[in-house]
């Protein structure tokens, strides 16, 4: 009796984990697609209006958020891993995605700093004239 209940429980957990993984993956992909499209539209608008172009922050945010959802999916995926080899591969995927997320956050931070420095330089130049 207990074996039957535990077997059903394991099946339910496995099923819910698979649905969660697929859902989180889709959300991450959707965010990356929409964010990339928005960044492209901003680029085209700014090229047309001759405004300064800096879409790195917008695109970086979308990529970072999408990667966060995809990493969440990988973490949930650890529930359904059966072999140590699969777990090692999954760990490497999580590590690579974490490194990518860190690099994207670092790039966004640098872009913001550069943007602020450019604005301050332009202001000080305008004030001196």
Image (spheres, rainbow, N blue to C red):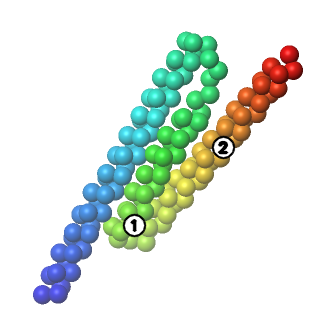
State which tag comes first along the sequence, 1 or 2.
1
Q: Tell me the distance, in whole angstroms, between the alpha carbons under discs 1 and 2.
A: 31 Å
- Left or right of 121, for residue 73: left
- The x and y percentages for residue 80 are 33, 67
Q: Residues within 10 Å of mark 2 (few under 14, many from 20)?
A: some
> Which residue lies most toward the right here?
128
Please tell me whether residue 68 is drawn above or below residue 34 in the rendered image.
Answer: below
In front here: 84 or 14? Answer: 14
Give the residue drawn at x 37%, y 62%: 77
Local secondary structure at mark 1: helix
Of the two numbered discs 1 and 2 in the rendering, the one whose residue sits closer to the viewer: 2
> How many numbered circles does the render carry?
2
Residue named by callout 2: 109
Quarter of the C terminus within the rendering: top right
* Residue shown at 50% from the left, 58% from the top: 94
Q: Decide which of 93, 64 is in the foreground and name it.
A: 64
In which quarter of the view is residue 14 placed? bottom left
Residue under numbered circle 1: 78
From this viewpoint, is residue 96 visible?
A: no
Would residue 74 be found to the left or right of residue 53 on screen?
left
Secondary element type, mark 2: helix
Q: Quadrant of the N terminus?
A: bottom left
Along the line of sight, which residue is nearer the eye, 88 or 52? 52
- Residue depicted at x 61% and y 47%: 105
Asked if one can make out residue 72 in the rendered structure from this viewpoint, the answer is: yes
- Residue at (70, 32) in percent of width and height: 115
Residue 120 location, x and y as percent?
A: 77, 30
Q: Residues within 10 Å of mark 1 (few under 14, many from 20)?
A: some
Instruction: Give whichever of 30, 80 is nearer the camera.
Output: 30
Q: Position of residue 68 (x, y in %)?
A: 47, 52
Which picture quadrant has residue 109?
top right
């Amino acid at each position: 009796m207990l074996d039957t209940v535990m077997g059903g429980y394991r099946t339910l957990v496995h099923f819910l984990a698979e649905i969660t993984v697929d859902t989180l993956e889709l959300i991450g992909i959707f965010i990356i697609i929409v964010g990339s499209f928005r960044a492209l539209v901003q680029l085209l608008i700014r090229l047309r209006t001759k405004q300064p172009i800096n879409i790195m922050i917008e695109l970086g945010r979308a990529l970072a958020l999408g990667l966060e959802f995809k990493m969440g999916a990988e973490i949930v995926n650890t529930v359904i891993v059966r072999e140590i080899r699969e777990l090692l591969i999954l760990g490497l995927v999580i590590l690579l995605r974490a490194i990518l997320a860190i690099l994207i956050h670092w790039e966004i931070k640098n872009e913001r700093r550069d943007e602020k420095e450019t604005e301050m330089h332009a202001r000080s130049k305008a004030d001196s004239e």
